[in-house]
Amino acid sequence: MRSALSSLVGLASFALVSWPSSGVSQSVTTMTDVDGNEYRAVKIGEQVWMAENLLVTRTPDGREIVSYFFNDDSAAYATYGRLYTWDVSMNGALEEEAQGICPDGWHLPSDAEWTQLFDHLGGEEIAGRELAVGGSTGFDALLAGGADFRGNYLYFETIALLWSSTEVNEERAYHHHVDRDGVAGRFAAMKGARIYVRCIGDDS
């Protein structure tokens, strides 16, 4: 899997509710993107995360962007969210924690923010179980695969792939993932890979 992986103005409406002191949330609130799509959001530790994959088709200032559905099939895969290249997801930015295509008040999580999430849940070897659908966090990582930079769709029902805002070099950026065995981690993917996006709150 590892070698194949290598080829791989919105108004946020958000009201905090009472969160459990354990840092693992069972409570849900919502936020909205520029297209009017509404998403669940959960608090995990000190961070607030989208609990669904992004579906937006425009930048926060309203410009249309290129996005994809798994297997190019919107009828079958729309519920899993849209796939974006790294450059599109970052909306042309290069700095970590850029807003990118996230709604106002939200940004693409950095490598460090993903690491903070995994560490809060006990480390990469076990964090995926809590982040998967049915896990205690409500994050509901979907094993919806993605596509490599050639456009080959891969790993459906095997792994959840989610961009970070951290660039590795001119060709690659980190994605973070949860696999079906409950293991979380990261990989330096080609920026042209088509991968899902989860946003994190700016105040996290």
Image (cartoon, grey):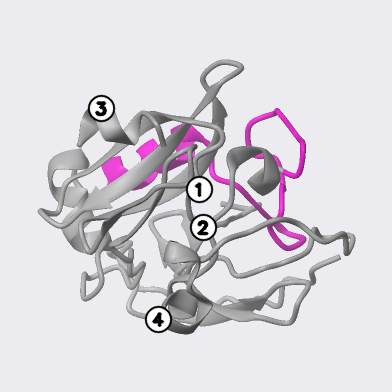
Disc 4, SS: loop
Query: Which tag, 1 or 4, sits closer to the chain's start?
Result: 4
Kindly identify which numbered label has been placed on residue 60: none
Please give the residue where the numbered disc 1 appears in the rendered image: 194
Disc 3, SS: helix
Label 2 vs label 3, nearer the camera:
3
Indicate whether 136 appears above or below 6.
below
Residue contact at pointers 2 and 1, CB within 8 angstroms: no
- Point 40% across, 81% down: residue: 27
Residue 97 part of the magenta-drawn span: yes
The range drawn in magenta is 91-120
Label 1 vs label 4, nearer the camera:
1
Query: Which tag, 4 or 3, sits closer to the chain's start?
Result: 3
153 sits left or right of 104 in the view:
left
- Point 49% across, 61% down: residue: 49
Label 4 vs label 3, nearer the camera:
3
